[in-house]
Image (tube, rainbow, N blue to C red):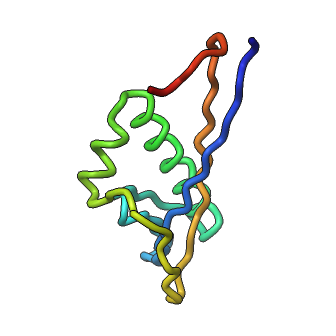
Amino acid sequence: MGTTRVEFKIKVPIKLVKKKKYYLASCPALDVFTQGENKKKAKNNLAEALSLFLTTCLEEGTLDAVLRSCGFRPAKRKLKTISQPQDYLNIPIPLIANKEAKECHA
């Protein structure tokens, strides 16, 4: 069997705030912050920082612990969308499986 590629996407709420000559971009839910010279650069920098953060957590086997320490827990059912003006980013998490076909879960 060849390589299997999968991409998960996580939709995270973000905040953008103008501070002097820079824009601060943050994802308070995951405690990730960065900046940029304009809104677009700040959002791009935040997307990259979040992607690196989540990928590193996954690689290190700490994603579950990090999410729990940020206050996350599995939802029992689909949650209703809260209609607040909120900006979001979709962060891709690419995965590759390089193993022979067999059961991957118990």
Query: Would you identify the image quadrant in which residue 43 lies?
Result: bottom right
Q: Is residue 17 left or right of residue 73?
A: right
Residue 19 relative to residue 43: left or right: left
Residue with the most extreme left position: 69
Query: Where the N terminus falls, by quadrant?
Result: top right
Most foreground residue, 63 or 28: 63
Residue appearing at x 56%, y 20% in the figure = 103
Work out whether residue 79 or residue 23 is closer to the camera in this orientation and state it: 79
Residue drawn 42% across the image and 63% down it = 27
Q: Residue furthest front?
A: 106
- In this view, 86 is above or below 24: below
Up/down of 11 relative to 51, above or below: below
> What is the tally of numbered marks visible in this picture?
0
On the image, the x and y values in percent for residue 12 come to 50, 63
From the top left corner, tell me how far across and down residue 86 is, in percent: 52, 81
90 on left or right of 14: right
The residue lying at 62 percent from left, 12 percent from top is 99
Query: Where is residue 48 drawn, in percent x and y?
Result: 56, 48
Image quadrant for the C terminus?
top left
Residue 74 found in image quarter = bottom left
In the rendered view, would you say 105 is above or below 8? above
From the viewer's side, name the closer residue of 29 and 80: 80
- Quarter occupied by residue 94: top right
